[in-house]
């Protein structure tokens, strides 16, 4: 997946349509992300055709004109946002991904973007959605780690990423590769360097711990293997586009609002 910078969330709303067809020109002022909750339609861009049904996630770049053909009346939770990305439009089946479904329900529950805490939550949630999708797409397109020369290192990372300082040289030795060759292959298979992959796993785990409401930020930092809480804050903000404190506050508020629906 190409790099993405989200500048602002313009709107989060339910969209229903029973129109048989329509056309959307380009370029537009914003990107469009929709989670289909019912119905069926087909979106056609210049280069692709996307068939969407319940639990399908659709991203439409502001640079892609498209035509829509309706098969059944559709309803979707839509997010309109501005930002910079070279990503092409895509569609992905999320039927077995409860996390994305839950995120979109929370996005809709927090669609009053005049509330600062809601905006912070929505920004972080969108990055999380694209992170999840990135992982799903890598599983579809990359060689399975079970059959790759990286398997020993991959298994070690999965078991020890929270408790050990994992050096590229040591991981490369596990696979009988030079450090340079190991790093090149790892990035080819997983889309990022070993260091970034490990950091992302730490931040993913940290975000889940923060949601429990049990641990302080300092405790989460220590559990996730960061010896410096300031460095943890810096890395968390880099990956999540929000500080750990604001993430914890906005997510807990989102959970309360969702429970009240």
Image (spheres, rainbow, N blue to C red):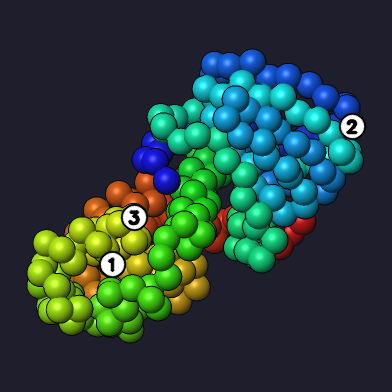
Give the x, y percent position of residue 104.
65, 51
**For residue 169, side relative to residue 68 (left or right):** left
Asked which quadrant contains residue 51, the reply is top right
Q: Disc 3 designates what residue?
A: 191
Q: Regarding mark 2 in the picture, which secondary structure is present there?
A: loop
Question: Where 47 sits versus 100, above or below?
Answer: above
Question: Where 160 sits versus 112, above or below?
Answer: below
Asked which quadrant contains residue 207, the reply is bottom left
Q: Which mark is residue 198?
A: 1
Q: Earlier in the sequence, mark 2 or mark 3?
A: 2
Q: Disc 2 designates what residue?
A: 18
Give the x, y percent position of residue 194.
24, 64
Q: Regarding mark 1 in the picture, which secondary structure is present there?
A: helix
Question: For the residues marked 3 and 1, what is the alpha-carbon distance in whole angstroms?
Answer: 12 Å
**For residue 14, side relative to residue 151 (left or right):** right
Looking at the image, which residue is at 32% across and 68% down? 202
Looking at the image, which residue is at 89% across and 40% down? 72
Question: For the residues marked 2 and 3, what is the alpha-carbon distance in whole angstroms?
Answer: 39 Å
Can residue 225 be seen here? The reply is yes
Question: Where 158 sits versus 91, above or below?
Answer: below
Question: Where 212 sits versus 38, above or below?
Answer: below
Can residue 199 be seen here? The reply is no
Between 190 and 242, the one lying in front of the other is 190
């Amino acid at each position: 997946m190409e790099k993405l910078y989200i500048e602002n969330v313009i709107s989060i709303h339910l969209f229903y349509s029973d129109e048989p067809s329509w056309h959307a020109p380009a370029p537009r002022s914003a990107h469009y992300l929709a989670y289909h909750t019912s119905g069926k339609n087909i979106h056609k861009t210049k280069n692709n055709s996307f068939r969407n049904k319940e639990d399908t996630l659709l991203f439409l770049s502001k640079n892609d004109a498209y035509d829509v053909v309706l098969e059944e009346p559709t309803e979707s939770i839509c997010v309109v946002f501005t930002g910079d990305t070279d990503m092409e439009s895509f569609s992905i089946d999320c039927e077995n991904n409860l996390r994305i479904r839950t995120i979109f329900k929370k996005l809709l529950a927090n669609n009053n973007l005049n509330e600062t805490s809601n905006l912070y939550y929505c920004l972080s949630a969108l990055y999380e959605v694209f992170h999840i999708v990135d992982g799903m797409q890598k599983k579809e397109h990359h060689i399975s780690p079970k059959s790759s020369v990286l398997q020993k290192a991959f298994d070690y990372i999965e078991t020890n990423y929270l408790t050990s300082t994992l050096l590229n040289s040591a991981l490369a030795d596990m696979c009988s590769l030079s450090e340079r060759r190991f790093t090149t292959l790892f990035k080819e298979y997983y889309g990022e360097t070993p260091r970034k992959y490990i950091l992302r796993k730490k931040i993913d785990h940290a975000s889940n711990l923060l949601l429990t409401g049990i641990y302080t930020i300092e405790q989460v930092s220590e559990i996730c293997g960061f010896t410096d809480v300031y460095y943890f804050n810096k890395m968390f903000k880099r990956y999540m586009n929000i500080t750990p404190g604001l993430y914890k506050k906005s997510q807990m508020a989102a959970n309360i609002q969702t429970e009240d629906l």
